[in-house]
């Protein structure tokens, strides 16, 4: 069964990704206002009223802001961990649309299987997700202080990877953020740098991977071209050919990315 994917928005101002397969049309996170998400989905060729589920990675508002609104407006089920549910402010979601997930326990939808997995971030119970069909696998995780063994296992052999390239180390260290915030970002429960992202991708590369999306770029401590070139150069240095093997993409801050489809 074919699968389609695009990012709707990515960054500290809001995160959202769209995936469809069969009759399933799901979002991973919904971190902008309901109105903004509807507009961005429309521009990506997606009707918000046709969404079948929303999966939340963690409770921070740049991942949850519009989830409750979309759920109530279009009667959409929302899935999250118990820790995320305890910390998130989604407003009242009817019980029939409120579902708790547990790491490593899969949720079977009509055309795909969605599995949460633990990640390291300063949130209550944050997760990434793998989305599988009978032929393909997508792995998505942003807000990563570092990539633990469990996350590494879930990224393995994915056809599409969505991974954080949050900051350039020099820009962050020499930037205007207060010391405490810099320490948080650099910690094991903070955010992944361009270099750390590139090294992980190179060390765990699979020829099965056709698309890599660099996501959650910092507006203050990164530049899209810098993130792209840093990761690209690390991959090229490890003899990974980006022209014939894998496509490297940047997830846009407030605009949908290209829609990619795997047949």
Image (cartoon, rainbow, N blue to C red):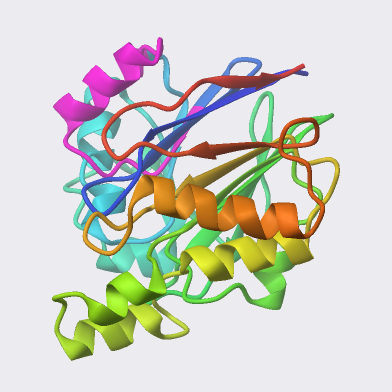
**Whole-percent x and y of residue 188?**
47, 84
The residue drawn where x is 27% and y is 67% is 87
Residue 24 occupies which quadrant of the picture? top right
Please give the name of the residue rendered at 53% of the width and 37% of the height, measured from the top-left corner: 249
- Work out whether 237 lies above or below 50: below
Indicate yes or no whether the magenta region holds residue 39.
yes
Residue 5: x and y in percent read 56, 27
Asked whether residue 124 appears in the rendered view, the answer is no
Magenta span includes 113: no
The front one of 52 and 233 is 233
Q: Specify the quadrant of the image occupied by residue 34.
A: top left
Along the line of sight, which residue is nearer the eye, 131 or 152? Answer: 152
Q: Position of residue 207 (x, y in %)?
A: 86, 43
* Magenta stretch in the rendered image: 26-49
Say which quarter of the image contains residue 237. bottom right
In which quadrant will I find the C terminus? top right
- 250 up-or-down from 20: above or below: below
Residue, x 56% and y 70% (percent of image)? 196
The residue lying toward the viewer, choosing from 117 and 189, is 189
Q: Quadrant of the N terminus?
A: top right
Position of residue 245 in the picture relative to residue 102 (left or right):
right
Q: Nearer the viewer, residue 155 or 131?
A: 155
Q: Is residue 131 above or below residue 155?
A: above
Q: Specify whether residue 48 is in view.
A: yes
Image side of residue 176 versus residue 77, left or right: left
Task: Classify residue 32 as left or right of residue 156.
Answer: left
């Amino acid at each position: 069964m074919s699968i389609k994917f695009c990012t709707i928005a990515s960054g500290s101002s809001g995160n959202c990704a769209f995936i469809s397969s069969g009759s399933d049309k799901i979002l991973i996170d919904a971190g902008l206002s309901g109105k903004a998400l509807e507009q961005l989905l429309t521009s990506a060729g997606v009707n918000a009223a046709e969404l079948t589920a929303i999966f939340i990675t963690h409770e921070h508002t740049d991942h949850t802001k519009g989830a409750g609104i979309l759920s109530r407006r279009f009667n959409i089920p929302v899935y999250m961990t118990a820790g995320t549910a305890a910390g998130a402010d989604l407003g009242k979601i009817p019980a029939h649309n409120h579902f708790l997930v547990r790491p490593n326990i899969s949720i079977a939808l009509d055309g795909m299987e969605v599995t949460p997995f633990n990640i390291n971030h300063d949130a209550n119970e944050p997760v990434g997700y793998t989305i599988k069909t009978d032929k393909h696998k997508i792995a998505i995780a942003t807000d990563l202080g570092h990539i633990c063994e469990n996350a590494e296992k879930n990224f393995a052999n994915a056809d599409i990877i969505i991974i954080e390239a949050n900051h350039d180390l020099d820009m962050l260290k020499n930037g205007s953020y207060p010391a405490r915030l810099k320490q948080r970002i650099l910690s094991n429960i903070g955010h992944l740098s361009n270099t750390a992202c590139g090294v992980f991708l190179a060390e765990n590369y699979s020829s099965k991977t056709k698309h890599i999306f660099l996501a959650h770029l910092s507006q203050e401590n990164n530049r899209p071209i810098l993130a792209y070139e840093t990761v690209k150069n690390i991959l090229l240095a490890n003899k990974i050919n980006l022209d014939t093997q894998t496509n490297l993409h940047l997830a846009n801050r407030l605009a949908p990315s290209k829609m990619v489809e795997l047949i």
